Image (cartoon, rainbow, N blue to C red):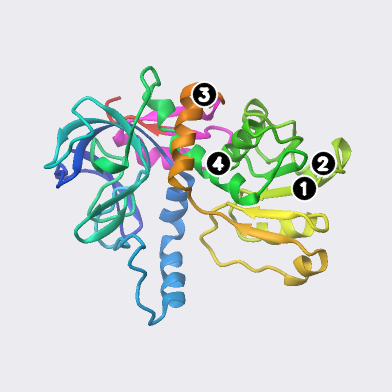
Amino acid sequence: MRAAVMRDWQLRVDDVPDPTPGPGQVLTKVLACGICGSDLHMLRHGAEVRRLMSELQGDAPPDPMSPKSFEPDHDTVMGHEFCCEVVDLGPGVDNLKVGDVVVGMPVAFDAEGMHALGYSNRYNGGYAELMVLNELLGMKVPDGLPAPMAALTEPLAVGVHAVAKSRIEKGEAAIVLGAGPVGLACIAELRMKGIGPIVVADYSAKRRELAARLGADEVVDPRDTTAIDAWRRIDGQKPLVIFEAVGVPGMISQTMAIAPRHSRVLVVGACMQQDVIHPMLGIGKELNIQFALGYEPHEFAASLTAIADGAIDLQPWLTGTVSVDGVPQAFDDLANPEAHAKILVVPGS
């Protein structure tokens, strides 16, 4: 099969062996798989992340509940925002059948332990024609929901989880810094929860437009108006939660600097580089800072339901599709926020 393969932090397209489902697993044909910003970050900063995590781990034994880490000098096929069609069944599969269209949390398990789909040398992700899924983790896509929309379940779930971690409630306001895919997911969930006003700041005119279409009440270009000034102008009274969804060094410190006293900061931008903060910014204002990663199974399922039921229209989020052979160019294209927000890999295209 064709696949976009990462090795030694370089991306290429190649022919690789077809995967084979084991007990309790199914073989699926990838219908659509979103390209995630974390994959772009991993390609650029993955070596630094691994060094940092190794230093932090030290001589402590690995957590048996953590997915097995991939080795960068071996082939890794990324892609964890997938929608697939079942084409073959492994031994002991009872709840899925050939022809079922499914999404799933990007985790596989077998006798050797847990594996992160898209960050595993053993189990490939969705930048490929085929992939293996565990039957127990596959969620059937409701009839009539197109595969490209179903593939947005995973990225929406990231926003659902971040909003839940922030503990924001009706009667409170939100600022979202960064209207990339993670920020847009947060905006969508905040709108579904009835939070307002939602103020969004991004340098990109295209992303500001998408933020408004997904539910932002006010969008600003930080070069002209700061998010905190916009919030003070249109509200300024409600308790405030600030979502840092940029994920580059310096953003946490900048967020702490603009945060009003006693406000909450939710860090969901996936910064993979070392960063520096000034603790007195948080101490002096008594800020509450929360970090968020991923999602819980019920949040993933709720995201699929929300998309299928039309609770939020995510169609504006989709800005392009590529074949497997187009993945490397798509990685480059996504560096321009004026060009794209979410590109889907559609192997059959």
**Nearest to N terminus: mark 1 or mark 3:** 1
Going by the numbered disc 2, the residue's amino acid type is Trp
Going by the numbered disc 4, the residue's amino acid type is Val
Taking the image as shown, residue 28 lies to the left or right of residue 59, namely left
CA distance for labels 3 and 4 = 17 Å
Residue marked by disc 1:
240
* Residues at marks 2 and 4 touching, judged by CB atoms closer than 8 Å: no
Find residue 64 and name its label.
Answer: none
**Nearest to N terminus: mark 2 or mark 3:** 2
Q: Residue furthest front?
A: 94
**Nearest to N terminus: mark 4 or mark 1:** 4
Residue marked by disc 4:
160
CA distance for labels 2 and 3 = 27 Å
Q: Residues within 10 Å of mark 2 (few under 14, many from 20)?
A: many
Q: Residue furthest bottom?
A: 59
Question: Tag 3's secondary structure?
Answer: helix
**Nearest to N terminus: mark 3 or mark 4:** 4
> The magenta stretch spans which residues?
316-343
Residue at point 35%, 77% (across, down): 61
Q: Residues within 10 Å of mark 3 (few under 14, many from 20)?
A: few
Question: Tag 2's secondary structure?
Answer: helix
Residue marked by disc 3:
315
Quarter occupied by residue 326: top left
Residue marked by disc 2:
231
CA distance for labels 1 and 3 = 29 Å
Taking the image as shown, residue 72 lies to the left or right of residue 171, namely left
Is 338 part of what is drawn in magenta? Answer: yes
